Amino acid sequence: MTLDPIRIGARRSPLARAQADDVAALLGAAGVPSVFVGITTVGDVDGRALTEIGGTGVFTSAVREALADGRIDLAVHSLKDLPTAPVDGLVLAAVPPREDTRDVLVGLRLQDLRDGVRIGTGAPRRAVQLIELGHRLQIVIEPVPIRGNVDSRIAKVRAGECDAVLLAAAGLRRLGHLPDTLEGSSNSETVVNGLPASVLSEELMLPAPGQGALALETHESLSPPRANAVRALNDPVSRAESLAERGFLAALEAGCTAPVGARAFVKSVRGMSLDLTLAAVIGRTYLSNLSEPTKSGPTATPGLFRLQRRGATEDPVQFGAAAAREALTELLDEPVPDGHVQRAGPASAPNTERENPL
Ligand SMILES: NCc1[nH]cc(CCC(=O)O)c1CC(=O)O
């Protein structure tokens, strides 16, 4: 039996197109034909900073609508851009093998960072970790808010708007800007589009939850042969790691613009049980965004809260959520300078049941 082509929908940016083409190639290798349908999203037409546009799903809502309306069969998103709350009728059918999860400094190498350096990024997660990196190096690093697609951000370095930018290795690699040969956890030197660059280790810069992973989303009404063809692209390890990171984010009631980095690893698998590690950072500025009672509390506390956890679990989302609840308790119990009085806990219990289980 031959299938009608699967209609793959994604944003129209070059990276989204490259991601959709990667998925088309995976389907093609399995003998499944597909066609591309480009969809314009709010994030593509609104030039303001993402933290200003607000809301969730700036890059994903319009693609999800096309899926719900039956205009496409398969949505390809960057998992890190996909809100953690489930949408009725939509299923996370597959997370294919994940790309490099690290961030890359483009424009300067790590050892070339100097006092007063200006680094372009619109992501609070990157900004808070850059400031921390500056503390470690005993220099001032100034995050400069920028946005735009990968190529336009690199162009801002050439135009002198900033000294360097931070970008996801995954996006650079999918666009063919980063060699395939950089592996390992050390800070590797490289060249991106003729500019000096360093791939940053996770000790220096934890990625966004789900960074480097693709989310292949379908509607539950998709016919079984097509649904099976998509499900066959799932990589259980990539999925478990990404979902643990997203479970952490969801339980903080935070989205992709939060100052939160996380990286989970599946260390081993025993039947249904996964041995998982999770490393995470929460910028203390996060607390100022919690609902009212904290506003007068620890907002002035600078720096990063770091967390390491390891354990066996059958449910990566719950593992991540439990880590987040512990982190939140510790954060809110911290002694606060200036004699501020702190509340005992979040105003409402964080919702930990938002993510599809495996
Ligand atoms: N928010 C933009 C975005 N969404 C996904 C990627 C890169 C691919 C990925 O992380 O999976 C990027 C660009 C970047 O952060 O450099």
Image (tube, grey):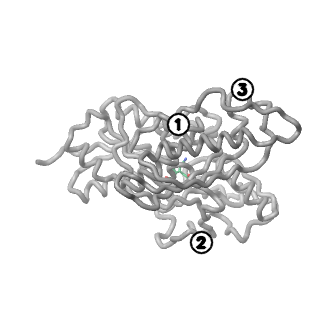
Residue sitting farthest toward the left: 1
Q: CA distance from mark 2 to mark 1?
A: 32 Å
Element carrying mark 3? helix
Disc 1 residue type?
Val
Dots 1 and 3: beta carbons under 8 Å? no
Q: Where in the figure is residue 289, as x and y percent of width and height?
A: 69, 34
Which mark sits nearer the N-terminus, 2 or 3?
Answer: 2
- The three-letter amino acid code for the residue at tag 3 is Glu
Q: Mark 2 CB in 8 Å range of ligand 1?
A: no
**Residue under the image location 51 percent in, 53 percent down:** 311
Relative to 162, 266 lies left or right = left
Amino acid beneath label 2: Ser
Where is mark 3, residue-wise? 292
**Front one among 22 and 340:** 340
Vertical relation: 198 (above or below) 353: below
Residue drawn 68% across the image and 32% down it = 345
Q: Which mark is residue 58?
A: 1
Residue 122 visible in the snapshot: no
Are discs 2 and 1 less than 8 Å apart at CB? no
Residue shown at 66%/47% (left/top)? 282
Q: Residue at x 46, y 70 (%)?
A: 180
Residue under circle 2? Answer: 188
Tell me if the residue at label 1 has its CB under 8 Å from ligand 1. Answer: no
Q: Image quarter for residue 30? A: bottom left
Disc 2 to disc 3, how far (Cα)? 43 Å
- Separation (CA) of disc 1 from disc 3: 25 Å
